[in-house]
Image (cartoon, grey):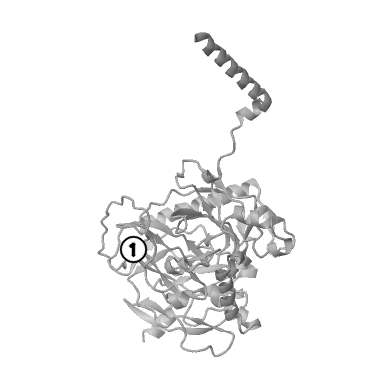
Amino acid sequence: MKNKLLISLAMAAVSLSLTYQIRGADDMDSPPPIPAQEQPEVLTKGPVHEAFASPVNLKDSEGVVVKVQPPDNIQEVLPPDKPSGEQFTWVSGYWSWDTDHNGFIWISGCWRAAPPKMSWVPGYWARMDIGWKWVAGFWFQTGTREIEYVKVPPAILDIEPAGLPPSNDLIWVPGCWYWSNGQYVLRPGYWLQEQPGWIWIPSHYVWTPHGYVFSEGHWDYPLERRGVLFAPVCFPRDFHVRPGFSFSLGIVVDIGLLKVNLFTCPRYSHYYFGDYYDDIYMRVGIYPRFEGGRRYACYDPVFEHDKWRGKLQNPRWEENERRDYELRRDNKELRPSVTYHEQESRMSKIQEPQRKNFQVAQPMSTVAADKTATQKYEHMDSDVQKKTSKQGSDIQQYREERKHWESNSQPEHAVQEHVEHVEQANVPNEKHNSDVTYPERVKVPASPVVGWQSPGNSAESLPASPAGEHGDRNDGRGMSRDEDRHRTK
């Protein structure tokens, strides 16, 4: 028996030796590729980075609350190309709850041309008694040294106009309550003269755990001039951010196709792009962009601008938008792919002329090499890359600082939150001081993302701020001094 065992072991050793010689030593040292299920997956569907574009939530602070703690932030590694122009600055990414995956996905950072004279305060996930709630980011006037927190404003009743516009070059701006002398004063809705090449973002309030913040009205760039939007990424379910972990970004979203497949989620204050055509998405609050304002107290500045521009060429523009939506809703073959891998597989099976209708995302290197594109790109040297990397770290630090200064108290006027049906987690109760006196001001550090100014984008080149929506207030009370005196007489 012993001899037979030795013979068997010898034969096995010879077999292993032959296999090793056939495959080669290098192959034996190189493991097979990691299964696709264990790797991050680039998505061609998901939320749009809130600093790039956001619908205006005019309702309440219902928000999005989940009972799963978001992972630690990811360090992003950028490709060497960036859009040409000093107006573009890097805004790092963040985690977003995704209903499709029943978990968090990473909303990649973006190159953003900040609105002139405006700075960015990034959003964050706040710890609440019942879970984690998203607190939206917002733009505020550059140079503001304090952020004022006020009590919940009254409801806005004139979100939509009572009738048709007096002329085709006007868009409706909803009313807004201004905090003045210890009370709210209403600025009614009005018709605004639209300006080519600019989008008006109306004044509105943003809910925070510390109170409501006034974000003043300002002019912003159309989406195609705002910069570069990188695609969101889904990590494996058991993924944990380890110290020193970084992820290389490389796939960017086509802004033209983003607008074709654009949706709004007002209570989350986010746009969504991609295949959200099934009716189930409207039941969870993700609407076609022409439905957001009607179904929810929401103002969509991008849609209002596109509608105005579209109707100049075709009075039936809005009807065509609805028809195109219904075609994709009823025919899945006309919808964009859900993942970048799926898109690339699809592209290989269709002819070149049709590819442009479905190629929602592509490599940054391909985009930067396109000499026919309106937006030009430049190669970053090592110093610029280090500066950009620090910019991303500063944004994440600013996010944490905001979370800290707004977590000292949780006022009683925070409305009942809407809780997603998600996996349960142990969330210890936390007590918050609800004894808050309004207004309350908090000194804030300068934002890493600041609106750029040059002779070509100076205040003189911007359209004038509409009456009642002044951008020159310095008293921190939600309106200019002149308007304040006028409205409180």
Q: Where is residue 401 in the image (x, y as percent from the top left)?
A: 41, 54
Q: Quadrant of residue 349?
A: bottom right
Q: Where is residue 396 in the image (x, y as percent from the top left)?
A: 47, 52
- How crowded pointer 1 is (Cα within 10 Å; few <14, some 14-19, many 20+) is rated as many
Question: Is 253 above or below relative to 13?
Answer: below
> So how many labels did they put on this image?
1
Looking at the image, which is closer to me, 21 or 198? 21
Looking at the image, which is closer to me, 315 or 109? 315
Judge from the rendering whether residue 459 lies leftward or rightward of residue 206; answer left or right.
right
Q: Where is residue 402 in the image (x, y as percent from the top left)?
A: 40, 57
Name the quarter where the C terminus is drawn: bottom left
Looking at the image, which is closer to me, 279 or 363? 279
- The residue carrying mark 1 is 210
Question: Is 74 above or below relative to 297?
Answer: above
Q: Can residue 30 be seen in this view?
A: yes
Looking at the image, which is closer to me, 180 or 191? 191
Q: What residue type is labelled 1?
A: His
Residue, far right: 371
Q: In which quarter of the image is residue 170?
A: bottom right
- Identity of the residue drawn at 62% across and 85% down: 315
Q: In which quarter of the image is residue 318?
A: bottom right
- Identity of the residue drawn at 64% across and 24% down: 19
Residue, far top: 3
**What secondary structure is found at the residue carrying circle 1?**
loop
Q: Position of residue 56 (x, y in %)?
A: 46, 71
Q: Is residue 82 visible?
A: no
Question: Is 435 above or below relative to 321?
Answer: above
Judge from the rendering whether residue 250 lies leftward or rightward of residue 142; answer left or right.
right
